[in-house]
Amino acid sequence: ELKVEQNPLFLSMQEGKNYTIYCNYSTTSDRLYWYRQDPGKSLESLFVLLSNGAVKQEGRLMASLDTKARLSTLHITAAVHDLSATYFCAVDMYADGLTFGKGTHLIIQP
Amino acid sequence: DADVTQTPRNRITKTGKRIMLECSQTKGHDRMYWYRQDPGLGLRLIYYSFDVKDINKGEISDGYSVSRQAQAKFSLSLESAIPNQTALYFCATHAVDTNEQFFGPGTRLTVL
């Protein structure tokens, strides 16, 4: 059974600081997704990582994938308030549906 | 217009009632999915369909059924709703070429 663990589950940080969210998964896969969810809203796709060593960046967010370690990271650089949201990682093995982590609730304070 | 739509967006029903949640997509994707989201648990897969004739159970299919009426339509039914089915339900499609999954706006279901 595929398990996906995120940590931390809750994170409060100050604007301007850097931080990393970690996503570990239990079974070999080379498809890893990061989503953002605002309260009461749907999921917004941030990154799709499809190979070992993949790195993608969009604005202040950068995601990476290490399939050998079964680990993905989402790094936040110089956080701003607008990045406050819940972030999910999810793993896909055979396109038979995503297995999600429990999400990281991120609060960025001025 | 949104590529993946869900109706209704909000629904309150009573225990024992039958209810159907509908999903439509204009993306032309064969693969469609239903997930439910509960606070603190992330999203969990209920059912998925690779095409009109291929429907499969997900992690938490008990108490649910689905119908794939056409490539563009995938409906989720609760035959006899119970309070622990109160959740936020999402439909999604999968793009084979980019491996992206696209989520609908969600349906908030409350079972009293």
Image: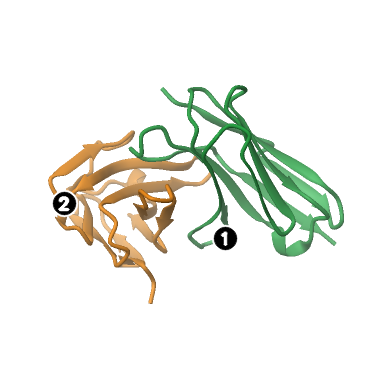
Chain colours: A green, B orange
Residue at image x 19%, y 58%?
Answer: B71
Q: How far across and how far down the image is residue B13, in percent?
A: 28, 60
The chain under label 2 reads: B
**What is the three-letter code of the residue carrying label 1?**
Pro
For the C terminus of chain B, which image quadrant? bottom left
Residue at image x 42%, y 40%?
Answer: A98
The quadrant holding residue A103 is top right
Q: How far across and how far down the image is residue B21, in percent?
A: 26, 59
Residue at image x 72%, y 59%?
Answer: A59
Q: Which residue is mark 2?
A: B67
Judge whether A79 appears above or below A25 on screen: below
Q: Is residue B20 visible?
A: no
The chain under label 1 reads: A
**Count of all numbered marks drawn on residues in the image:** 2
The quadrant holding residue B53 is top left
Q: How far across and how far down the image is residue A16, in percent?
A: 87, 56
Is residue A20 rendered to the left or right of residue B8?
A: right
Is residue B75 rendered to the left or right of residue B12?
A: left
Q: Is residue A48 visible?
A: yes
Residue at image x 24%, y 49%?
Answer: B81
Q: Which element type, helix, strand or loop, lies under badge 2?
A: strand
Is residue A49 rendered to the left or right of residue B15?
A: right
**What is the three-letter code of the residue carrying label 2?**
Ser
Q: Which residue is mark 1?
A: A39
